[in-house]
Image: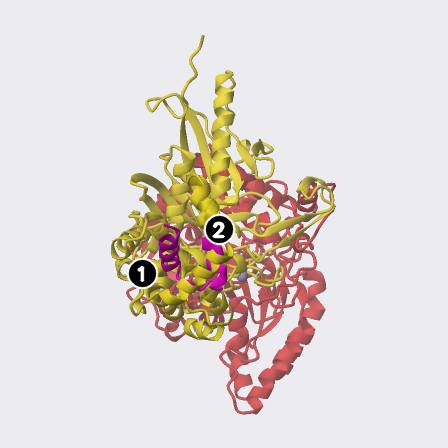
Chain colours: A red, B yellow
C-alpha cells in the first residue's frame, strides 16, 4: 500500500495503524542488517504513536492526512529525547531536548516517526559512505551506493521500510539519492519548509523535503510539512499553494525547457540523457511545448557551491567543541581539548570541508572566494529567472550517472562532487526541484529525471511530475 | 636642550550597552540579571544543533529610538554577521553581530557644547560568563572552568564614537551624556558597575592637530566613569612618556587595573585574530519601515539636554543639580511630580531634597525610586513645611528620614515628634537670655576678643541656644535675636 492508501484505510478503520507499523517493523527487521539504512528504529515509540492514532479513530476523531503512515527521519532531524547523530561520532550520546518543526507536523498529521536514517556525516557527501556508522547500500544492488547524503532515507522508501521519508537537500542530497534508489524526492523552495530542528550543514542552502514511492505520496508529505514557522526567520511568511489538489491537472500548454548544459554535458551518461529526452517527449505528447534552453552560469555552480557550503559549514560546525555536549576528548588545556575532540569526532570529508570553508572566509581571501561565489550565485539565480520568463518548468538529469559501486569514488573527492553537478544550481537559486524515476539504465539501476520550477511553483512542478511518472517505462 | 612636546590625545570610545528588553536578542528567554546559573537558557541561546535565531523586534525598536535621539542615519537594510572564534562562553563558537552593515550609522551627540561624532551603532548578542576555578583564577592555570550561559544572547548595542574626543574629561562627559540619553529613551539601565554598560577606549597621541593619528591602544576593564577618566589619563601619560623616550607605541589591548592604578598589556594574540566575518544566513536583513520609524519618533520622550534646560529655566536651579536630576533614573520625574504637588513650597526646596537627602538615601540603601515609601506628594509636603517656616533644613532632614523609612506623612511626623520649628520671638528670646546668663564668660570673651574670637564665641552661643531649643529654634530668628543681645 502506498501512503495515501494507508492513511485512507486507517482513517476508515479498515486497518489499524498498529498493524501497519508492525508490518514495516518486520520488513526493517529482515532487511536493515544488510542495507544499514536505519541507524535507529524507534519501535516502542512507533507502536505507542500508532496506538494513539487507533484510539483517535476508535473515538471517532480524524487523526489527520498521514493517519498511521510511518515516516522515516534523516538522522539530522531533531526529535525530543531521541539520539541524533548526524552520522557523526562528535554528537555521541546527544539527545535533543526539542523536536524539529517538520517532525511535529508529521506527528500532528497522524504520521508515525519510525526511525532515524543513515546519512553522510553532517549531510556532506553523495553516497552515504561518509557516515561514521558505515555506508548504506542500495536496495536495488547492495554492491552499489544509494546516493547521498540522504541515502538512508531514499533506501528506506525503496526497500519499503517506510512509505515516506524526510531528508535534507543542500546540493542535491534528496534528489540524487532518490534518483539512484528509484523513488521520488523533492527539494522545496528555500523557506517553504521550516529548518527549525534540522542540524545545519549550510544554512543558506539546506532545505528539508519528502521522499515517496510515488509523486502523489511525496505531495502528501510535502503539503503536511510546508508552511510558515516563526522559529525560522528564513521561513516564507506568505500563504502557500498546496500541491496535492492540482496533481492531476495535466500539462497542456505548459512550456517545458530542457537545460542544455546539464543534459548534454560531458559527464552525463547516454542512458541518463536519453531518459530526459524521453520524458520531454512524453510531456510534449501530453500537450506541453518543449524547447531547449541554455543556462550558461550553471557550469560555475559546482565551484560556487564548494565555496559557500563549506564556508557556512565551517561556522555551523564550530560549536562541536567538546564543551557542552557530545564527544569530549580531554587535553592538557582548553585548546588541546577542542582540537582532540574535533580531530577524533569528525570524519575526513567533514574536516576537508571545514578547512576549505575556513580558508574561503579568511581575511584577504574572502573577496576572491566567498565574495566571488556569492556573485556567481546571484548570476545563476538571474539566469534561472531569465529562462523562467519563457518556461514554466525545466528538465535535466538528476544525477549524471546511475548508482555507482561502493568505494568507486571515495578516493577522489572531485569525482564525488561531480555527482551533484545537476542538482546544485537549484540550491544556489533557492528554487524547487524534484527527481522522478524514469526506467533503468543498462546496469538495471534506476534513472531519475529532474524537474525544476521557479520559486514557490511546486504545484506546477508536481503536475509535470505526475505526467512523467505515468509515462515512465 | 629639547623642548617637551605637548602631546595631543585622540580618543575614541566603544560603548557596549545592554538593552533592557524583556527577552534575549534571538530567543524568548528572560533578559534578567542575577538568576541562578544556567536557568535563563533554551536551545537557541545555547546554540544547540538545529536551533535557529529569531530577532527580537523590541531590540530593533530600541535602536530606532536611539537613532531619533542622536540623529543617526538608519540604512534601508542592515545585516547580521557571524564573528567566528572559539571560546567556551560562546555557545556557537561564533557571535552574531553586525559588521559591514550596522543598524545605525553616523550619529552625533553634544557634549558640553562640543559635537562628538558617532561612527555607528550595531546590535549583537552577549556571551556567557566563565568562572575559572583553582589556580590563579584565570583560564590558563585553572583546574576547571564553569560557564553560566544566562547572559548568552542578551542584546547589546555597541556604540562606536568617532575619534573626536580630546581629553579624559571629555570622554567622561561623552559617556555620561550618552548614558543620560539611553536612560531617557528607556532602552537601557546603563549601569557601568553592574556591567549593563561597558566602555572601551582607543587612545593615541600626536604632536599637533595637523598630524596623522598615532598608533592607537585599546584599554578595557573600566567599571565606572571615574576609572574611565583615570585610565585614559594614565594611558595618555604612559604613551607620552614612551614617545618622549623614542619608544614606538605598539597597537595592542591593555587592561586597566583599578587597584594598581595602571594599564597592562594583555597577551597579544588579538593582533593576529581573523574573525572570518560573513553574513549570518539564519537571519534576514533588518529593514525598518517608515511607519516603524514614525511611531518611534512620535513616542520619543524629552531628551536630557532639553529637559535640563527646561528645569533650569523653570525652577532656577543650577546645571549640576539639573544633571543629577536627569542622570539618576526616575529622579527628574519624581521631582517634577513633587513640584506639581506643592502647595506654597518652593521648587528649589524640592530639588534640594531630591539631590540631597533622597539621593543619599537611594545610594545608601541601593533602592530605586519606585521602591521607596515616600511618594512625590509626601516630598512636596515636606518642601511646603520648609517653605512656610515650620521646619528648618536640619529638622526637615529628620522628618525626611522618618517618612522615607515607613511612609508616614511629614505632617504626622512633625506632630508626633513635636518637631515644628519655633519661630515665636518671645520664646526664643527667653531661651537666649538663659543661655547668655549661663555663659557670662563666653559673652565677656566675645566682647574682648578679636574678629576670630568673636566669631568663635558667637558660634558657641548659637549652638547652645539651638541645643536649648532642642534643635527646633528658627535659625534665622535666633541669629537675629542673638545679634541684638550681643551689641
Ligand atoms: Zn534562550
First reached walking from the N terminus: tag 2 or tag 1: 1
- Residue drawn at point x = 68 percent, y = 53 percent: A89
Q: Quadrant of residue B454?
A: top left
Residue A320 visible in the shown view? no
As drawn, A283 above or below B83: below
Ligand 1 falls in quadrant:
bottom right
Q: Which residue is mark 2?
A: B460
Q: Main secondary structure of the magenta part?
A: helix
Taking the image as shown, residue B168 lies to the left or right of residue A103, namely left
- Residue drawn at point x = 32 percent, y = 49 percent: B318
Q: Secondary structure at mark 2?
A: helix
Q: How many badges with numbers are in the image? A: 2
Mark carried by residue B347 = 1
Q: Which residues are magenta?
A: B460-487
The residue most toward the top is: B1
**A331 inside magenta stretch:** no
Residue B139 image position (x, y, % from top left) = 67, 42
Between A76 and B31, which is closer to the camera in this rendering? B31
Q: Secondary structure at mark 1?
A: helix
As drawn, A375 above or below B406: above
Residue B198 image position (x, y, % from top left) = 49, 46
Q: Nearer the viewer, mark 2 or mark 1?
A: 2
Amino acid at each position: 500500500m502506498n501512503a495515501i492508501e494507508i492513511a485512507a484505510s486507517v482513517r476508515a478503520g479498515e486497518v489499524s495503524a498498529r498493524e501497519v507499523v508492525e508490518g514495516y517493523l518486520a520488513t526493517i527487521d529482515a532487511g536493515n542488517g544488510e542495507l544499514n539504512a536505519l541507524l535507529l528504529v524507534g519501535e516502542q515509540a512507533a507502536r505507542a504513536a500508532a496506538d494513539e492514532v487507533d484510539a483517535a479513530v476508535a473515538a471517532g476523531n480524524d487523526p489527520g492526512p498521514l493517519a498511521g503512515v510511518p515516516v522515516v527521519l534523516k538522522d539530522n532531524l531533531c526529535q525530543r529525547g531521541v539520539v541524533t547523530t548526524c552520522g557523526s561520532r562528535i554528537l555521541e550520546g546527544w539527545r535533543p531536548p526539542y523536536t524539529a518543526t517538520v517532525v511535529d507536523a508529521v506527528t500532528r498529521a497522524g504520521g508515525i516517526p519510525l526511525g532515524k536514517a543513515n546519512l553522510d556525516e553532517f549531510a556532506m557527501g553523495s553516497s552515504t559512505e561518509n557516515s561514521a556508522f558505515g555506508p548504506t547500500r542500495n536496495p536495488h544492488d547492495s554492491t552499489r551506493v544509494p546516493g547521498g547524503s540522504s541515502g538512508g532515507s531514499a533506501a528506506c522508501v525503496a526497500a519499503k521500510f517506510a512509505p515516506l521519508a524526510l531528508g535534507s537537500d543542500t546540493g542535491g542530497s534528496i534528489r540524487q539519492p532518490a534518483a539512484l534508489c528509484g523513488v521520488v524526492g523533492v527539494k522545496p523552495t528555500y523557506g517553504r519548509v521550516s529548518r527549525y530542528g534540522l542540524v545545519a550543514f549550510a544554512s543558506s542552502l539546506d532545505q528539508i523535503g519528502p521522499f515517496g514511492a510515488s509523486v502523489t505520496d511525496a505531495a502528501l508529505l510535502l503539503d503536511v510539512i510546508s508552511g510558515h514557522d516563526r522559529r525560522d526567520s528564513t521561513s516564507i511568511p506568505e500563504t502557500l499553494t498546496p500541491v496535492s489538489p492540482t496533481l492531476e491537472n495535466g500539462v497542456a500548454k505548459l512550456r517545458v525547457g530542457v537545460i542544455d548544459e546539464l543534459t548534454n554535458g560531458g559527464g552525463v551518461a547516454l542512458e541518463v540523457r536519453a531518459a530526459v529526452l524521453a520524458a520531454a517527449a512524453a510531456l510534449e505528447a501530453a500537450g506541453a511545448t518543449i524547447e531547449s534552453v541554455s543556462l550558461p552560469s550553471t557550469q560555475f555552480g559546482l565551484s560556487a557551491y564548494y565555496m559557500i557550503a563549506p564556508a557556512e559549514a565551517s561556522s555551523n560546525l564550530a560549536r562541536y567543541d567538546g564543551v557542552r555536549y557530545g564527544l569530549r576528548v580531554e587535553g592538557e588545556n582548553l585548546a588541546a581539548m577542542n582540537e582532540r575532540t574535533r580531530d577524533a569526532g569528525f570524519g575526513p570529508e567533514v574536516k576537508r570541508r571545514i578547512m576549505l570553508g575556513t580558508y574561503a572566509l579568511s581575511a584577504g581571501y574572502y573577496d576572491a572566494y566567498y565574495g566571488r561565489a556569492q556573485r556567481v550565485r546571484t548570476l545563476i539565480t538571474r539566469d534561472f529567472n531569465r529562462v523562467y520568463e519563457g518556461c514554466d518548468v525545466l528538465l535535466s538529469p538528476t544525477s549524471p550517472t546511475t548508482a555507482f559501486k561502493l568505494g568507486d569514488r571515495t578516493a577522489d573527492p572531485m569525482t564525488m562532487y561531480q555527482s551533484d553537478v545537476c542538482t546544485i544550481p537549484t540550491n544556489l537559486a533557492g528554487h524547487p526541484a524534484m527527481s522522478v524515476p524514469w526506467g533503468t539504465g543498462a546496469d538495471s539501476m534506476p534513472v531519475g529525471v529532474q524537474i525544476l520550477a521557479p520559486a514557490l511553483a511546486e504545484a506546477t512542478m508536481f503536475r509535470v511530475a505526475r505526467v512523467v511518472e505515468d509515462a515512465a517505462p | 636642550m629639547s623642548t617637551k612636546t605637548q602631546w595631543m590625545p585622540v580618543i575614541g570610545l566603544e560603548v557596549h550597552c545592554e538593552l533592557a528588553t524583556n527577552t534575549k536578542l534571538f530567543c524568548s528567554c528572560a533578559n534578567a540579571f542575577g538568576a541562578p546559573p544556567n536557568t535563563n537558557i533554551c536551545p537557541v541561546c545555547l546554540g544547540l544543533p538545529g536551533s535557529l535565531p529569531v530577532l527580537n523586534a523590541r531590540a530593533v525598536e530600541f535602536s530606532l529610538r536611539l537613532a531619533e535621539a542622536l540623529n543617526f542615519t538608519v540604512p534601508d537594510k542592515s545585516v547580521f554577521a557571524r564573528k567566528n572564534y572559539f571560546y567556551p562562553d560562546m555557545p556557537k563558537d561564533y557571535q552574531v553581530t553586525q559588521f559591514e552593515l550596522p543598524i545605525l550609522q553616523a550619529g552625533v551627540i553634544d557634549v558640553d557644547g562640543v559635537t562628538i561624532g558617532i561612527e555607528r551603532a550595531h546590535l549583537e548578542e552577549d556571551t556567557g560568563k566563565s568562572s575559572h576555578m583553582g589556580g590563579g583564577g584565570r583560564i590558563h592555570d585553572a583546574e576547571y572552568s564553569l560557564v553560566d550561559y544566562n547572559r548568552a544572547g542578551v542584546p547589546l548595542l555597541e556604540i562606536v564614537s568617532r575619534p573626536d574626543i580630546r581629553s579624559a574629561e571629555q570622554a567622561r562627559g561623552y559617556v555620561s551624556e550618552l548614558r543620560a540619553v539611553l536612560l531617557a529613551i528607556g532602552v537601557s539601565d546603563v549601569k557601568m558597575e553592574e556591567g549593563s554598560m561597558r566602555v572601551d577606549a582607543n587612545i593615541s597621541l600626536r604632536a599637533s592637530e595637523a598630524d596623522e593619528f598615532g598608533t592607537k591602544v585599546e584599554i578595557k576593564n573600566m567599571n565606572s566613569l571615574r576609572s574611565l577618566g583615570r585610565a585614559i589619563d594614565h594611558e595618555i601619560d604612559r604613551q607620552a612618556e614612551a614617545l618622549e623616550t623614542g619608544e614606538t607605541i605598539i597597537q595592542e589591548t591593555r587592561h586597566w587595573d583599578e587597584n594598581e592604578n595602571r594599564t597592562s598589556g594583555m597577551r597579544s594574540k588579538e593582533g593576529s585574530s581573523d574573525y572570518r566575518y560573513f553574513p549570518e544566513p539564519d537571519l534576514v536583513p533588518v529593514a525598518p519601515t517608515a511607519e516603524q520609524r514614525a511611531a518611534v519618533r512620535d513616542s520619543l520622550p524629552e531628551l536630557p539636554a532639553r529637559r535640563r534646560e527646561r528645569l533650569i529655566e523653570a525652577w532656577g536651579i543650577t546645571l549640576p543639580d539639573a544633571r543629577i536630576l536627569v542622570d539618576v533614573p526616575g529622579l527628574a520625574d519624581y521631582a517634577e511630580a513633587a513640584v506639581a504637588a506643592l502647595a506654597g513650597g518652593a521648587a528649589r526646596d524640592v530639588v534640594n531634597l531630591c539631590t540631597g537627602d533622597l539621593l543619599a538615601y537611594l545610594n545608601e540603601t541601593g533602592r530605586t525610586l519606585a521602591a521607596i515609601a515616600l511618594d512625590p506628594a509626601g516630598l512636596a509636603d515636606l518642601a511646603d513645611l520648609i517653605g512656610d517656616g515650620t521646619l528648618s533644613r536640619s529638622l526637615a532632614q529628620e522628618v525626611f528620614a522618618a517618612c522615607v523609612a515607613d511612609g508616614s506623612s511629614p505632617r504626622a511626623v512633625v506632630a508626633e515628634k513635636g518637631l515644628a520649628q519655633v519661630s515665636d520671638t518671645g520664646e526664643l528670646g527667653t531661651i537666649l537670655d538663659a543661655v547668655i546668663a549661663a555663659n557670662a564668660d563666653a559673652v565677656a570673651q566675645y566682647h574682648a576678643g578679636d574678629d576670630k574670637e568673636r566669631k568663635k564665641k558667637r558660634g558657641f552661643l548659637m549652638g547652645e541656644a539651638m541645643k536649648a531649643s532642642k534643635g527646633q529654634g528658627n535659625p534665622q530668628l535666633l541669629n537675629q535675636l542673638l545679634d541684638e543681645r550681643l551689641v
